[in-house]
């Protein structure tokens, strides 16, 4: 059983938020996990039941987070099936991981409703010595249980975990990181703002060399190629229309700090700028994060 409470005041967000504005999030979760014996011992299933309450006071927080003013509630049930046969949790070079999940916010009176599907696959293949190849495919869909509009659940694509720190656009949204692009820019627009999509496709490939492996330091330089996009509906869905990036980087693990990722990626495809500091044109972009991709 988990419980969290978050209260944010105007000084954390932007000048658009009034002095008396506030935002509270209360959430609780119970879950169960157990390992399966069939088809093999790598499978695991899990069930989650969670409750969230959002309380928005002031239009500024509503605009900043994309949430309605007032109290919003959701009661969520999630069922997942996973398989993990990776030979190393931090720097895998062989094996695979698989995730399939179905999530429903129940359409109770006064509650937000939606249906969310997620399918993700990772594969790793040793090439020679400590050199390996990895590939990932990730898909998601958000729909409605009742046919009514889904209020604010969205996918935001782009950026790195460090870009998201101190940035509160992720409330009610899944933030999907992608190298070579700024945070959240690869998503449908509304009044010029990136509001997120209800469908996403994301792909990644890496060639990695585990150059140093010791209890004090693990260091793995890599080459990468990423592609992805998010769409608002199946009417606009075009799986061949992907934003692409490629480049190089290195992952470093120190026991005292955890996993760090430094990468320098080239944004191949232009995007609609989110503000005056972005050109949206192809360029190289450096990104750094703690905690990995």
Image: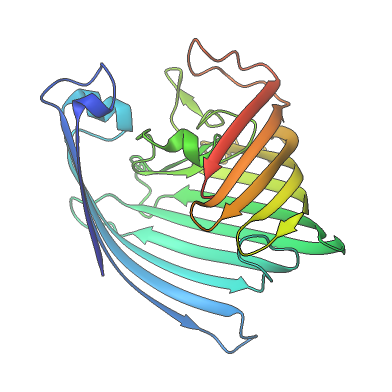
Q: Which residue is located at x 67 percent, y 20 percent?
A: 270
Q: Is residue 108 left or right of residue 267?
A: left
User: On the rendered structure, is 293 left or right of 56?
Assistant: right
Residue 274 against residue 88 in the figure, above or below: above
Q: Is residue 122 visible?
A: yes
Location of residue 170 by image quarter: top left
Residue 210 visible in this rendered orientation of the protein: no
Q: Quadrant of residue 106?
A: bottom left
**Looking at the image, which residue is at 47% across and 63% down?**
102
What percent of the width, then of the height, locates residue 177?
55, 41
Is residue 44 placed above or below 159 in the rendered structure?
Answer: below
Residue 289 in percent (x, y) is at 53, 41
Residue 275 located left or right of residue 62: right
Work out which quarter of the rendered image holds the N terminus and state it. bottom left
Residue visible at 75% across and 63% down? 93
| Residue 230 relative to residue 239: left or right | left
Residue 3: x, y in percent? 22, 60
| Residue name at image x 58 percent, y 59 percent | 119
Q: Residue furthest front?
A: 216
Q: Position of residue 63 (x, y in %)?
A: 29, 25
């Amino acid at each position: 059983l988990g419980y969290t409470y978050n209260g944010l005041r105007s000084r954390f967000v932007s000048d658009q938020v009034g002095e008396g504005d506030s935002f509270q999030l209360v959430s609780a979760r119970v879950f169960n996990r157990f390992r399966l014996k069939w088809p093999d011992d790598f499978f695991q299933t899990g069930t989650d039941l969670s409750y969230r309450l959002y309380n928005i006071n002031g239009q500024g927080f509503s605009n900043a987070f994309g949430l309605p003013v007032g109290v919003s509630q959701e009661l969520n049930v999630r069922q997942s099936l996973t398989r993990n046969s990776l030979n190393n949790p931090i720097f895998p070079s062989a094996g695979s991981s698989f995730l399939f999940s179905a999530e429903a916010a129940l359409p109770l009176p006064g509650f937000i409703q939606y249906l969310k599907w997620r399918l993700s696959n990772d594969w790793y293949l040793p090439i020679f010595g400590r050199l390996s190849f990895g590939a990932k495919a990730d898909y998601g869909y958000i729909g409605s249980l009742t046919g009514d509009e889904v209020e604010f659940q969205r996918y935001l694509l782009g950026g790195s975990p460090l870009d998201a720190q101190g940035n509160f656009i992720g409330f009610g949204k899944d933030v999907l990181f992608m190298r070579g692009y700024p945070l959240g820019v690869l998503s449908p627009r509304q009044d010029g703002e990136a509001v997120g999509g209800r469908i996403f496709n994301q792909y990644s490939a890496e060639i990695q060399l585990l150059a140093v492996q010791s209890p004090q330091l693990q260091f793995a330089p890599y080459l990468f190629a990423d592609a992805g996009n998010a769409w608002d509906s199946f009417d606009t869905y075009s799986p061949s229309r992907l934003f692409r990036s490629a480049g190089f980087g290195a992952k470093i693990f120190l026991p005292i700090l955890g996993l760090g990722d430094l990468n320098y990626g080239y944004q191949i495809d232009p995007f609609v700028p989110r503000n005056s500091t972005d050109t949206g044109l192809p360029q190289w972009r450096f990104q750094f994060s703690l905690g990995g991709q």
